[in-house]
Image (spheres, rainbow, N blue to C red):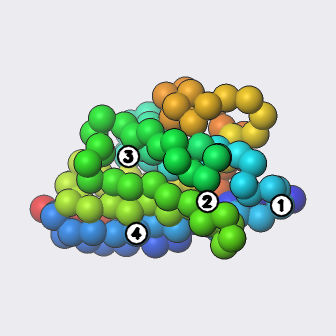
Amino acid sequence: EVQLQASGGGLVQAGGSRRLSCTASGFTFDDYALGWFRQAPEKEREGVACIGTSGGSMTYYADSVKGRFTISRDNVKNTVYLQMNNLKPEDTAVYYCAVGFGRGSAYYRLVSGNMDHWGNGTQVTVSS
C-alpha cells in the first residue's frame, strides 16, 4: 500500500522558516518524481515544487516560491523535504506531498498537478 505521511506544519511568523517532511512507503522511492502542492482556503490547489529522480538533480518551483523554498529528497530515508524560508502570509495553506508514477517529468507534474498518490496534508499558517 502506497503511503505518504507529511509533517512539519505549524504556525510561523512572517519572515520565518519551516521545514516540511514527507515519508513514503509502499513503492520504490528512488524511481519516481515527488512534489509538494498547497491549497489555501477558497483557492484551487497549486503546485509548489517538484523533484525528479536521477539523484534529485532536477527541481522545479512555482514562481511565487522561487528563491525562498527548496525541495530535496533523501532516497535512503524515503523522505522528501520542503525547506521554506522567508515565509509570507500568502504562503498559508494546507501542504500536500504527492508521487507521480509512470512517465511524466517533474516539471510536467508541477504544472499539471497530475500525481498518482497524495499524502495527508499539513497546515502551515504564516502570521503577519
Which amino acid, mark 2? Asn
Q: Amino acid at mark 3?
A: Ala
Q: CA distance from mark 2 to mark 3?
A: 15 Å
- Quick check: marks 1 and 2 in contact, CB under 8 Å? no
Picture coordinates of residue 108, whole percent (x, y): 56, 27
Residue closer to the observer: 125 or 8: 8
For the residues marked 1 and 2, what is the alpha-carbon distance in whole angstroms?
15 Å
Q: Is residue 38 left or right of residue 74?
A: left
Q: Residue at x 57, y 36 (%)?
A: 106
In front: label 1 or label 2? 1
Mark 3 or mark 4, earlier in chain: 4
Mark 3 burial class by Cα count in 10 Å: few <14, some 14-19, many 20+ = some
Mark 1 or 4 closer to N-term?
4
Q: Which tag, 2 or 4, sits closer to the chain's start? A: 4
Residue 49 seen in render = yes
Q: Which residue in the structure is indicated by mark 3?
A: 40
- Which residue does the image show at 37% across and 37% down from the upper left? 62
Q: Nearer the viewer, residue 116 or 73?
A: 73
Assign a secondary structure to mark 1: loop
User: Would you call the spot at circle 4 few (<14 residues within 10 Å), some (14-19), or many (20 or more)?
Assistant: some
Tell me the SS state at disc 3: loop
In the picture of the structure, the residue carrying the numbered disc 1 is: 26
User: Pointer 4: what residue?
Assistant: 19
Q: CA distance from mark 2 to mark 4?
A: 16 Å
Quadrant in the picture for the N terminus: bottom right
Q: Which residue is mark 2?
A: 120
